[in-house]
Amino acid sequence: MLFQYGTYAFSGRPMFTVALTRQFDISDDGGEDDHYVQIHCELRYECEPALDALGSFSSWFFHDADANLADWLAAMEGSLKPLLARVPSETDVYEEPD
């Protein structure tokens, strides 16, 4: 999973964007890796100085023996405290084209 935020102009005008991306490994009929599919969820907020001051950030989570998803999610949630009282202006959920 990828968690990221920052001020970007992906949808045309600059907006503070929080994005969570989940990557899925798709196997072929023989069980071999065939390709990956990425599903994105974006929350976009109007730019304002308090959000711009957060800058940009990104963090990947990979399942492995040492990874703890609950700890990673708690750390990412802590990054969002300035957004808790705000409502996004736009949302978008989409699959990245192959």
Image (cartoon, rainbow, N blue to C red):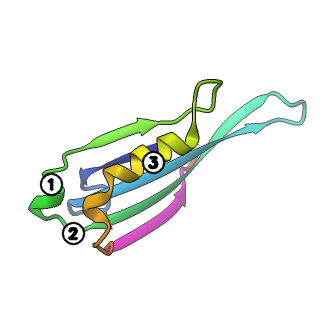
Label 3 sits on a secondary structure element that is helix
Residue placed under numbered mark 1 in the picture = 52
Residue 30 left/right relative to 10: right
Select label 2 or label 3 by which is in front: 3
Residue placed under numbered mark 2 in the picture = 46
Instruction: Give me the C-alpha separation between circle 1 and circle 2.
Output: 10 Å
Q: Residue 23 in the image: state x and y as whole percent.
A: 59, 42
Residue 75 left/right relative to 54: right
Instruction: Give me the C-alpha separation between circle 1 and circle 3.
Output: 22 Å
Q: Is any atom of residue 1 visible in this view? A: no
Tell me the magenta residue range: 89-96
Residue 21 circle label: none
Q: Is any atom of residue 13 visible in this view? A: yes
- What amino acid does circle 3 point to? Ala
Q: Residue 69 in the image: state x and y as whole percent.
A: 57, 41
Label 1 sits on a secondary structure element that is helix
What residue is rendered at 41% in x and 69% in y? Answer: 91
* Tag 2 and tag 3, C-beta contact below 8 Å: no
How many numbered circles does the render carry? Answer: 3
Q: First in sequence: mark 1 or mark 2?
A: 2
- What amino acid does circle 2 point to? Glu
Taking depth in this image into account, of 79 and 16 the one nearest to the observer is 79
Residue 74 circle label: 3
What residue is rendered at 38% in x and 64% in y? Answer: 43
